[in-house]
Image (tube, rainbow, N blue to C red):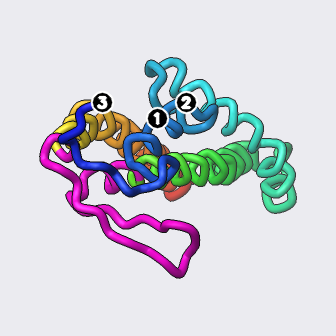
Amino acid sequence: MNPSAPVCPVPAEQQPLNEYQELKESWFFRWATLGWAGYLKPIVILWLLSWLISAPVAAVSFPFAKYPVQFLLSAGAGAMVIPALTLVRLYLGWIYVCNRLSQETIFYEESGWYDGQCWQKPAEVWQRDRLIVNYEIRALLRRIQLTFIGLSSLLLANAMIWLFL
């Protein structure tokens, strides 16, 4: 340990680097770090499982025997709700850590909500944190944003097909 290095007063569980490591290792948030196939697989599985909820709801308005296209379009759109909410949670977790790593001054709590403090990161810590943001986290956030664009495009296509029925 370098005796001239500044001592970090931030509790270990609130240090941005440790928050990043925890997120990267958690079973849910690690999902964003997988390859494209591993990343898309849970989204598709959630969408298929969501049909268990959306199909009966769609069947009430559009019985499959009478309106098969309307049934499929409405149930498919309804089934996108749970994957979309899951992606929002994934995005919020990663953007929180991104913001904590990007900030030069971080807020932390010593023992409870009533005694918050701010700590100015030394230049080398801030530089390391910005490298993590620029080379690892921004790519994950971009992937999640592209997924939202894809879901939005599917919903738009769904609406366009609906208009022409």
Residue drawn 63% across and 53% down? Answer: 81
Name the kind of residue labelled 1 in the image. Gln
Residue pointed to by mark 3? 1
* Relative depth, front residue between 38 and 53: 38
Residue 161 position, x and y percent, is 51, 49
Residue pointed to by mark 2? 25
Name the kind of residue labelled 2 in the image. Glu
Element on which disc 1 rests: helix
Element on which disc 3 rests: loop
Q: Which stretch is magenta? A: 97-126
Which numbered tag is attached to residue 130? Answer: none
Q: Are marks 1 and 2 in contact (CB under 8 Å)?
A: yes
- Alpha carbon distance from label 1 to label 3: 21 Å
Q: Quadrant of residue 130?
A: top left
* Extreme residue toward the bottom, this view: 114
* Relative depth, front residue between 29 and 43: 29
